[in-house]
Image (cartoon, coloured by chain):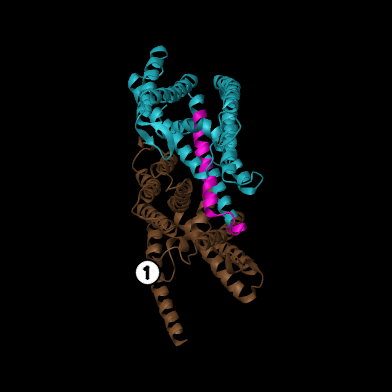
Chain colours: A cyan, B brown
Amino acid sequence: MRGLAGLAGCDMKTRIITGLWAGAIFVTLIALGGSPFVILMGVLALIGLSEFTLMRNHKLMAFPFLVTSLLVAFPFILMLLERRLVLEELPMSTTQWMVLGLMLLLFWTVVTKNRFTYEDASFYFVSAVYLVIGFSSFALVRLSEDGLVKVLLVLFMIWATDSGAYFTGKAIGKTKLWPSISPNKTIEGAIGGIVSAIVLGIVYVLIEPVLPILEVLVLAVVVSVVGQLGDLVQSAYKRQYNVKDSGHLLPGHGGILDRFDSMIAVFTVIWVFNLL
Amino acid sequence: MRGLAGLAGCDMKTRIITGLWAGAIFVTLIALGGSPFVILMGVLALIGLSEFTLMRNHKLMAFPFLVTSLLVAFPFILMLLERRLVLEELPMSTTQWMVLGLMLLLFWTVVTKNRFTYEDASFYFVSAVYLVIGFSSFALVRLSEDGLVKVLLVLFMIWATDSGAYFTGKAIGKTKLWPSISPNKTIEGAIGGIVSAIVLGIVYVLIEPVLPILEVLVLAVVVSVVGQLGDLVQSAYKRQYNVKDSGHLLPGHGGILDRFDSMIAVFTVIWVFNLL
């Protein structure tokens, strides 16, 4: 028991130190914005892809991962270049580039005589789309007008949701939300998360009036619900592959996919519905 | 033996009658162009999706197929509407719509507690992308300037490739191309197909000078190589699922995916590289 407690203490220390370091770098690059932030988003997307690949027990030094890496990197490179180049000078759009990547992955099923299957190709392509759309929407909001204020609003809403859900769940949580996917989540907690996001949103725009109050309410509900769903999708995925964490880049916090699951889902939905 | 011969005769008759009917409808709608052709492409994409779904032994009357059908139908509906509406009036772009579909499919993994897996979601999404890009690029070429002449050039090149490959293979085919994927194809046949497409292309632009001769040469090689690869990808896929035909809509010809595999791949590559 003593050993376990000691271990838990050590884990907590690692978790806090990693959290402080990673948090400081993250916050600095958010504040900087511009190209450094776009580069950060691209790097995180590539690390996420490596986590997906390793969870599937595939190798990183192989054709599918390398092709998909190029597929993931291109949209971020394009975002960096677009500030200097006219769009027409570029050879192809992001969508065209991604479809080219899909064709190469499908062709790889022929070359490997189905050792690499249509399902594998689909897996890589969908993981790429998930990461590219998530992290590039994040970058797009940051690059937009009032980008810093908007990004911070969304991040605070996500964190308010997590904390609100955690503490409400602890205090009054009784009814399980989805026991087979995420055993500790309760309906009371989920509602507490949504309420916290709404309260945070209202307080935030009273201080920094970046959006009308009605839009903040809509945003808070969307961010809170989608953030919790994004978390559940990653949990479902990890449960299928029987892993606890998507990776070990952030000791005590798991991998990039674990840490950014809510943000990926939230910024994707913000982009899909043109919310910010 | 007599029975087999009789059956073969009957099959051949069915094949020819179906071929004539389907061919007549296809050629008429190509000639008409405009909305009727866009609708045909959308319908073919939806039938292709049903074939993918059934090959995977999934049901058509279920959430994943229904969501993916909407995902597939939307780009074609958008193409029909764009001729009347201003683009800005539309709620979201094709890419945004498709990403929304992907999110719903991923969310379905949570609802079904992984009975519907991340791989299933990827499978549906990639099949949708494959069909939407293939058939809508086909429609885009037809709707472009000199669309009819260009579409016929590409189709003739594909058919020249098929016939050229078949007869060259029969006559001098010795070296197997990819025995484990498509046992009857030979390298000699593949080269014969490319040469036929080049000859057809040169003759075509001498009669109808729609492209400079150098561009026709590039187009012929791309169409011929990609057409044969598209065919191999479908073969690999069917071999994985252990089916001979993707469907039975066209008796004697298999399904839509069998009949359009080359065209889907070819028009996708034409779109990716802005070739026409």
Name the kind of residue labelled 1 in the image. Answer: Trp
**Which image quadrant: the N terminus of chain A?**
top right
**How far from the left and from the top, in percent, is residue A275?**
40, 28
A213 w.r.t. A229: above or below: above
| Residue at 58% across, 69% down | B183
Q: Is residue B81 left or right of residue A249?
A: left
B144 w.r.t. B158: above or below: above
**Direction bottom: furthest residue:** B2
Q: Is residue A123 left or right of residue A183?
A: right
Residue under circle 1? Answer: B21
- The answer to whether residue A135 shows anywhere in this view is no
Image-quadrant location for residue B215 = bottom right
- The answer to whether residue B135 shows anywhere in this view is yes
**How far from the left and from the top, in percent, is residue A231?**
46, 34
* Circle 1 residues within 10 Å: few <14, some 14–19, many ≥20: few
Image-quadrant location for residue A226 = top left
For the stretch drawn in magenta, the main secondary structure is: helix
**How far from the left and from the top, in percent, is residue B252?**
43, 71
Magenta part of the protein: which range?
Answer: A110-139
Q: Secondary structure at mark 1?
A: helix
Tell whether position A116 is magenta: yes
A39 w.r.t. B150: above or below: above
Residue toward you, A165 or B271: A165
**How far from the left and from the top, in percent, is residue A91?**
58, 41
Residue toward you, A3 or A43: A3
Count how many numbered circles sit on residues in the image.
1
A259 w.r.t. B45: above or below: above
Chain of the residue under label 1: B
| Residue at 49% across, 56% down | B264
Tell whether position A38 is magenta: no
